Amino acid sequence: MARLVDRLLARVAPKATASAGCKTTYYCSGGLKYKHVCCGRDCRDHVIGACGSP
């Protein structure tokens, strides 16, 4: 049973530490609100709505 738990933790732990190093910022451009996420050197932008909306 302990081996099963160790294998599960080995799969989850790297994902948790990788996401902990990410930085998220928000900005507006052209009337759209964006979420800018950088994890190390990998950065991505996601449209999340219109500017001024909650």
Image (spheres, rainbow, N blue to C red):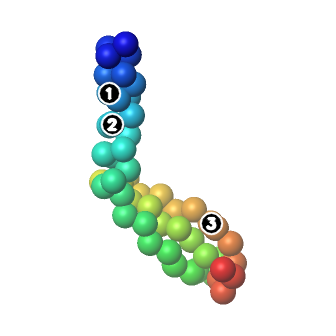
Residue 41 visible here: no
Against 26, residue 16 (above or below) is: above
Instruction: Give the number of marks.
Output: 3
Q: Which residue is mark 1?
A: 10
For numbered disc 1, what is the local secondary structure? Answer: helix
Q: Which residue is mark 3?
A: 47
Label 2 with label 1: CB-CB less than 8 Å: yes
> In this view of the protein, which residue sits in the foreground, 13 or 6?
6
Against 35, residue 31 (above or below) is: below
**Residue 41 located left or right of residue 27:** left
Q: Residue at x 50, y 75 (%)?
A: 26
What is the x, y in percent for residue 27? 51, 78
The residue under label 3 is which amino acid type? Answer: Val
**Residue 53 located left or right of residue 13:** right
Point out which mark residue 51 bears: none
Q: Residue at x 66, y 86 (%)?
A: 52
Determine the CA span between mark 3 and mark 2: 29 Å
The residue under label 1 is which amino acid type? Answer: Ala
What is the x, y in percent for residue 33? 61, 76
Q: Which residue is mark 2?
A: 13
Front of the two marks 3 and 2: 2
What is the x, y in percent for residue 35? 53, 68
Q: Residue at x 35, y 29 (%)?
A: 9
Q: Residue at x 57, y 81 (%)?
A: 28
Against 4, residue 13 (above or below) is: below
* Disc on the earlier residue, 3 or 1: 1
What is the x, y in percent for residue 3? 32, 14
The residue under label 2 is which amino acid type? Answer: Ala
Front of the two marks 3 and 1: 1
* Disc on the earlier residue, 3 or 2: 2
For numbered disc 3, what is the local secondary structure? Answer: strand
> In this view of the protein, which residue sits in the foreground, 1 or 40?
1
